[in-house]
């Protein structure tokens, strides 16, 4: 990791930049693939899948028989681990269910909000050298809790045309309704437009490389929502003299091994800590099967020495990391100053990989600085909030004049008339009631 000492604030913006493929090149590729899929459907999807994933692919539909067979290839130990993680994820996301609260904003005016599921959602799960079956849990479990009626999963086949059995096993366990052996831009395009085989979805979820992230952004132009910009993985660790350097090194490498375009950042106000962590990184690297990938990611990474923890936090808030680990004294106190982060891990024992798998929080998080404006995936990601209101005659009397006055000021006279008619009818009823009362007397 490149070591930088006490950079001036004027250099922070530059230091917070991520390694990026040129956007023009990215979007040109996405536009071409999307255009072909829109015109040719399954034929184009299969052509691109053969080009980029499995050359001999004949179909991208994954049958229920294939999914059932996959379960036999997953060890009982892994099944038990997946189930433990599923339960924790379900417990945490069920806690996010909100009850409707009715509020009387004015006499006779009652307003409230109710949740409704997004009916058809698409889940993208990276495969390849790291088949992320944990992402299936993170996305399908809250979708199931939300009540999404159709959960479509796309994940790339390997060079032999197979999908990791753990992905298929987890998909069935978590309630996925359809699985397709599709990856990359072609998977996002298929879910965006719909083909003869792949359903068009209303919202696409899931992490991926920069091509997948660019494709997800493009899908929004065609009326499909996305969870967030979620690209290459990243972690930022703030460590002081109380940290365990070996833990810090392991946590940095846990993100570096995701891919060569991942980025890891170490911040400290202690020069000795940075030196010890770098030494531990070298020690850990030797034993990593994905050593080459991690080494490439480390070329994009930095260790920055600041004068105090306050500057570390200030830089972190500017960087807005996907994952933030506070390996410091009194992490709970320091966490109060965190403004921008996808998910925060407090103290030496809170390793990021716990959040990736089994603590219960969601690991689908905003990257590339988007934690400044996006939240990670939650139950809310799979639902819409619909507002309701019920207005009685008393309510018309409460707000009617204000509505008429505001509509007239905006020169929207049909708006005004909708209220004027109701006010007029109420006035007639009032007069009638008074006349009837006088006759009785």
Image: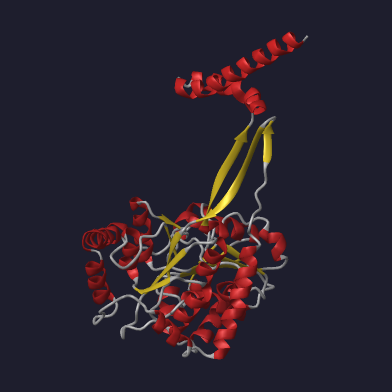
Color theme of the render: secondary structure
Q: Position of residue 252 (x, y in %)?
A: 53, 74
Q: Nearer the viewer, residue 335 or 423?
A: 423
Q: Residue at x 59, y 85 (%)?
A: 80
Q: Position of residue 67 (x, y in %)?
A: 43, 82
Q: Nearer the viewer, residue 318 or 392?
A: 392
Give the farthest residue toward the front. Answer: 440
Q: Quadrant of the C terminus?
A: top right
Q: Nearer the viewer, residue 420 or 234?
A: 420
Q: Residue at x 48, y 24 (%)?
A: 415
Residue 194's place in the image compared with 3, above or below, is above
Q: Nearer the viewer, residue 340 or 319?
A: 340
Residue 109's place in the image compared with 117, above or below, is above
Residue 272 shows up from this direction: no
Q: Is residue 173 left or right of residue 392?
A: left
Q: Is residue 20 left or right of residue 147?
A: left
Q: Is residue 165 left or right of residue 339?
A: left
Q: Residue at x 38, y 62 (%)?
A: 213
Give the farthest residue toward the right. Answer: 441
Residue 156 shows up from this direction: yes
Q: Position of residue 35 (x, y in %)?
A: 23, 58
What is the number of callouts on the image? 0
Q: Residue at x 50, y 18 (%)?
A: 408
Q: Position of residue 336 (x, y in %)?
A: 68, 56
């Amino acid at each position: 990791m490149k070591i930088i000492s006490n950079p001036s604030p004027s250099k922070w913006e530059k230091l917070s930049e991520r390694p990026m493929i040129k956007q023009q090149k990215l979007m040109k590729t996405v536009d071409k693939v999307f255009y072909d899929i829109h015109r040719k459907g399954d034929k184009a999807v299969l052509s691109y899948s053969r080009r980029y994933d499995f050359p001999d692919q004949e179909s991208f539909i994954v049958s229920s028989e294939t999914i059932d067979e996959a379960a036999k290839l997953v060890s009982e130990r892994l099944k038990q681990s997946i189930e433990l993680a599923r339960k924790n994820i379900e417990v945490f996301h069920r806690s996010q269910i909100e009850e409707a609260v009715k509020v009387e904003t004015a006499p006779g005016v009652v307003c409230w909000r109710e949740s409704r599921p997004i009916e058809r959602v698409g889940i993208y799960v990276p495969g390849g050298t790291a088949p992320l079956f944990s992402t299936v849990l993170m996305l399908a479990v809250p979708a199931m809790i939300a009540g999404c009626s159709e959960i479509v999963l796309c994940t790339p086949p390997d060079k032999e045309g197979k999908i990791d059995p753990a992905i298929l096993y987890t998909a069935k366990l978590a309630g996925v309704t359809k699985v397709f052996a599709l990856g990359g831009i072609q998977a996002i395009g298929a879910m965006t437009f719909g083909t003869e085989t792949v359903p068009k979805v209303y919202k696409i979820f899931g992490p991926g490389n920069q091509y997948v992230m660019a494709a997800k952004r493009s899908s929004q132009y065609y009326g499909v929502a996305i969870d967030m910009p979620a690209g290459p993985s990243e972690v930022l660790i703030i460590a002081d003299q109380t940290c365990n350097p070996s833990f810090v090194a392991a946590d940095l490498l846990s993100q570096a091994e995701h891919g060569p375009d991942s980025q890891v950042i170490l911040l400290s106000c202690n020069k000795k800590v940075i030196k010890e962590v770098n030494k531990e990184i070298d020690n850990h690297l030797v034993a990593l099967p994905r050593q080459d990938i991690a080494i490439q990611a480390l070329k994009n990474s930095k260790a920055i020495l600041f004068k105090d923890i306050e500057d570390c936090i200030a830089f972190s808030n500017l960087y807005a990391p996907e994952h933030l680990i506070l390996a410091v004294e009194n992490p709970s106190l320091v966490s109060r100053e965190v403004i921008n982060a996808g998910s925060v891990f407090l103290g030496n024992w809170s390793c990021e990989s716990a959040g990736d798998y089994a603590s219960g929080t969601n690991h689908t998080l905003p990257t590339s600085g988007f934690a400044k404006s996006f939240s990670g995936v939650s139950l809310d990601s799979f639902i819409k909030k619909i507002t309701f209101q019920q207005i009685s005659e008393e309510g018309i009397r409460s707000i009617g004049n204000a509505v008429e006055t505001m509509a007239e000021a905006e020169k929207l006279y049909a708006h005004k008339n909708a209220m004027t008619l109701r006010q007029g009818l109420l006035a007639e009823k009032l007069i009638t009631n008074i006349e009837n009362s006088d006759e009785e007397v």
